[in-house]
């Protein structure tokens, strides 16, 4: 699967994309592929104020659990409740399935994240 150019990425395998005045965050295809079949997505605290790199939630699969990190300093403003019943949606369509919404403290911080080519280099480096 190609890496979309319409969003930014972090080396911990989250993507972030603007939607109006908020940002959507999900995990990348390489991340979901490495985790395997997801069975739980959650522990996202709406209203939490996080620094970049702090844990925003968790994804669990049949073989591993992994934290999801805030890509930038932010306030978490929403969680994709549909994932409570269908976490496997991320496996099927990782770039169109968001996990949480945030409002960045400084929107310009998002521009400093990895573009698709730079994220691909992270994936290729293993």
Image (spheres, rainbow, N blue to C red):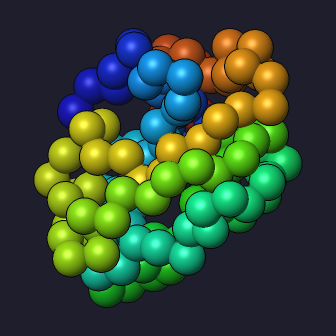
Residues 90 and 108: in front is: 108
Q: Is residue 90 visible?
A: yes
- Residue positioned most to the right: 51
Q: Is residue 13 visible?
A: no
x and y, in percent, of residue 36 in the image: 29, 70
Quarter of the figure with the N terminus? top left
x and y, in percent, of residue 46 in the image: 60, 62
84 relative to 54, above or below: below
Residues 11 and 125: in front is: 11
Which quadrant of the structure image shows residue 86?
bottom left
x and y, in percent, of residue 112 in the image: 74, 17
- Residue positioned most to the bottom: 62
Q: Is residue 29 left or right of residue 121?
A: left
Q: Is residue 67 left or right of residue 32?
A: right
Q: Is residue 44 left or right of residue 116?
A: right
- Residue positioned most to the left: 92
Which quadrant of the structure image shows residue 95?
top left
Q: How many numbered circles does the render carry? A: 0
5 relative to 124, above or below: above
Q: What's the residue at 80%, 23% (across, down)? A: 106
Q: What's the residue at 50%, 53% (across, down)? A: 78
Quarter of the figure with the C terminus? top right
Residues 120 and 106: in front is: 106
Q: What's the residue at 42%, 78% (across, down)? A: 60
x and y, in percent, of residue 6 in the image: 39, 14
Q: What's the residue at 33%, 65% (across, down)? A: 81
């Amino acid at each position: 699967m190609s890496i979309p150019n319409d969003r930014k990425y972090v080396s911990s395998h989250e993507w972030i994309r603007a939607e109006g005045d908020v940002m959507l965050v999900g995990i990348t295809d390489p991340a979901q592929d490495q985790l395997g079949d997801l069975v739980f997505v959650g522990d996202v605290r709406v209203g939490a104020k996080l620094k970049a790199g702090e844990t925003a939630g968790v994804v669990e699969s049949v073989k591993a659990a992994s934290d999801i990190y805030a890509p930038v300093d932010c306030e978490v403003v929403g969680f994709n409740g549909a994932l409570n019943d269908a976490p496997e949606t991320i496996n099927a369509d990782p770039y169109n399935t968001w996990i949480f919404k945030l409002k960045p403290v400084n929107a310009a911080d998002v521009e400093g994240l990895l573009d698709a080519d730079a994220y691909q280099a992270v994936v290729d480096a293993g």
